Amino acid sequence: MNQGRGAPARFMSESSVRNLCIMPALALLIAFNVFPLLASLGISLTDFNPIIDTAPRFVGMGNYRDLVESPRQEVWRSFSRTGFLVLVTVGLETLIGFAVALLLRRSFRGRGLFTAILLIPMMLSPAVMGSFWRYLFNADYGALNWFLDARLNWDGSRALAFWAVVIAEVWMWTPFMILLSLAGLNAIPETLYEAAEVDRAGAWFRFRHITLPLAAPMVLLGIVFRAMDTFRLFDTAMVLNGNLEGQHTTFVSVLLHARGFGGSRSLGEPTALAYLLLIASLALATLVLRYLDHVRGVGAPERGRRP
Amino acid sequence: MANPHIHSPSLLIRTVILLPALLSLLTGCGSRRETPEIKILWAEWRPSEALAELGRLYEAKSGVSVKVVKKSWDGAFGDATFSEFRNRDDNYDIIIGDSQWMGLGVVGGHYLELTDWMKENVKLDELEPAALKWYCEYPKGAARYYAVPCEADAMAWAYRKDLFEDPGHRAGFARYLAANKVSPAFPLAPPGTWDQLRWIARYFKQAVPGMAGLVMPTSRNYDVATMSFEPVMWSFGGDFGDYLTNRVTIDSRGTVNALRFYADLMQTTSAGGRNMGYGEVSAEYIAGRAAMACNFFAFFPAIANPGNNPDFYDKTGYFNSPSHTDASGASLRAVALGGQGMSVNAHISPERQARAKEFLKWFLESGNQQLWAEKGGFSSNKRVLASPSFKKAAPYNPLFEEAFQLMRDFWSVPEYDDLMKSCQREFCAVFQDGADPVEAVKQIQAEHEAILRKHGRIQ
């Protein structure tokens, strides 16, 4: 039977309808993403300063060169400082978070309430949390110095200012790692431990060969999220120590804010810095995605295996 | 009599016709003449309240309302001003910008030039020359004016009179000087030299447990540490450079010695004293945890106010920055300038510019400057500063006339922010983290030259 006969002629082909539907989204994407991206690339190649009413002058890679050669290598230092912060902060959050999750996995009275209380810091706004910590860190009347019975200059010494940010971040985001670790630990079938016990496997063996590998995918996911989040850290550092250049808390996002909104500077240099940050973020995101794919590939058969 | 053949319009049509008229009556649109208004952009602090009060007097006299829009010092004031500049907006008729922003306002074409207008409408000889130079002129020494003086300000010191006048401390201080073989000895009184100030601060730090010898604005934020270092630097013979030729001269023996001295002063401050903002300095002093506090005059009303400072408001004395005598016997003394000038927005209509200038003229009249001072503002009018009523109005007022003669300021070129960031970073590295003063000063010299060269200010 010829089904095509008698069917009404189509006004538009299927592909045309599909293209028409895509077009509004495409137009929005071009207007709000592609165009600003290209425009800012253009600005990064000029000395455009909207406050000083002069025509933008093309300076080629001058802004990028100035960033690379910035006084005291501030730009590179801010990148390495941010990397170090990611390592230290996420490392501590993972260690503490996983350890607490192991304790919380055991059943005891009031476990639910205890877990809920532990999650509170994560639910606070970073700006509010930063303000609290600012008072706690105050060298003259802060509770931390009182508790330690010390006169540590948390905000006056640049080195201590870095560790103040680490402490505040670890306090705030360890609950996140507890949560993910707990989810990973609770997903491990109890039968595995029972089988191990039958085989007289020791505690360390059970931890090394059952708990760690099976909880790892979830913990790694948490590490990835936290690493990306810490890489763009701004709010806590800003509240604790301001948007200052040349400090031990001048992370990449802080430096970008200081240069972009710091008063008299041209827009060219901060835009060039934003591009460097974009390239670094894309590289990090690609690495992370590849790693996640790898973990998924490794984890899938592990999870599918039955004792 | 109405024509019976003509139907009256339906209720819907009548509503459509009458509703806009009714709404315009209710909202006043179209029927009420708007009162002319002058909008002023300034920071949120006590002097802007005083200006708003003066504005109400001006409205009563002229029928032109004056609205002072106050933005927080914590970034919003700068953001609002720079947004106005960037967008060439006409939101404000008058901008009371920081003295360091003068170059941005002038070179960017945002401030109206007032040179000729001031010569015709303002009694220039009534104004302190320092005020004209630092608040109104750009570039310095060019005799071209873009603002009139508004809130004058300078850095000075508050000290605990009760401690200084205590016989036990006087005797203890004499013993302390003798033990440290300080010659010639000097009494426990407001110091005449920076060296004396350091000995007094050292004494109180060790003699009174929990008390700092001094607190100063030392924060890494914006310009704070640089402002409090400036008087020391200038007194020791250091300088930023020549503001007319833009030649940078900060790399000098004077600056290095001043930086060493300043770092040594920090040994006498509190644990948190190496990173303190202006407000925190006052709070620390009011809490009774410091024998001396350096701050801008604008912060002194809070110290002298019994409501704010019930314990020490009447036990506080004030002195201007001390001097320093170098090896050749030359004595130098300077104070850091604060405060702002009042500029007319160049992007508003000529009619609004004329209205704004009328207000400036009224504001500068001697009688109104007297009122300004009475309401807590700091005037630049010589007669007001010399008047007994001003000197008696507050315990720190008698110092202000002298402070005017010692005032100096930071760069005001459009690149001031880059220059300031370099100073803040290097100065703080020395007294907060023990960096080498020689290297710090060399670094600033190189950076300042590079910045000014890049923007064509020097060859």
Image (cartoon, rainbow, N blue to C red):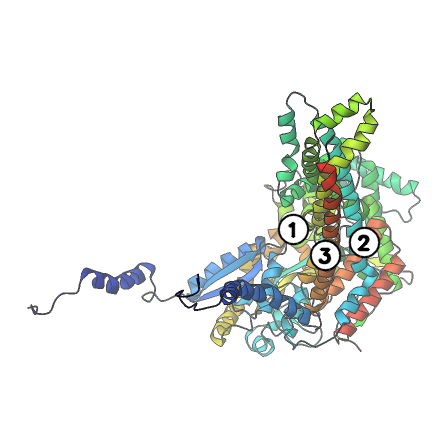
Q: How far is disc 3 from disc 2 in space, using C-alphas? A: 14 Å
Q: Is residue B308 left or right of residue B368?
A: right
- Which callout, 1 or 2, points to the residue nearer the camera? 2
Residue at 71%, 77% (x, y): give it: A58
Mark linked to residue A80:
2
Describe the element under mark 1 as helix, strand or loop: helix
- In the rendered structure, which disc, 3 or 2, sits on the residue that comes first in sequence? 2
Q: How far is disc 1 from disc 3 in space, using C-alphas? A: 45 Å
Locate residue B416, reporting x and y percent.
72, 66
Check the residue under mark 3 and report the chain it is in. A
> Number of callouts in the render?
3
Locate residue A183, reporting x and y percent.
67, 34
The image quadrant of residue B452 is: bottom right
* Callout 1 and callout 3 share a chain: no
Which residue extends farthest right?
B181
Describe the element under mark 2 as helix, strand or loop: helix
Residue holding disc 3: A281
For the residue pair B24 and A301, the one nearer the viewer reads as A301
Dot 2 amino acid type: Ser
Residue holding disc 1: B299
Locate residue A218, reporting x and y percent.
71, 39
The image quadrant of residue B212 is: top right
Q: How far is disc 1 from disc 2 in space, using C-alphas? A: 40 Å
Dot 1 amino acid type: Phe
For the residue pair B319 and B266, the one nearer the viewer reads as B266
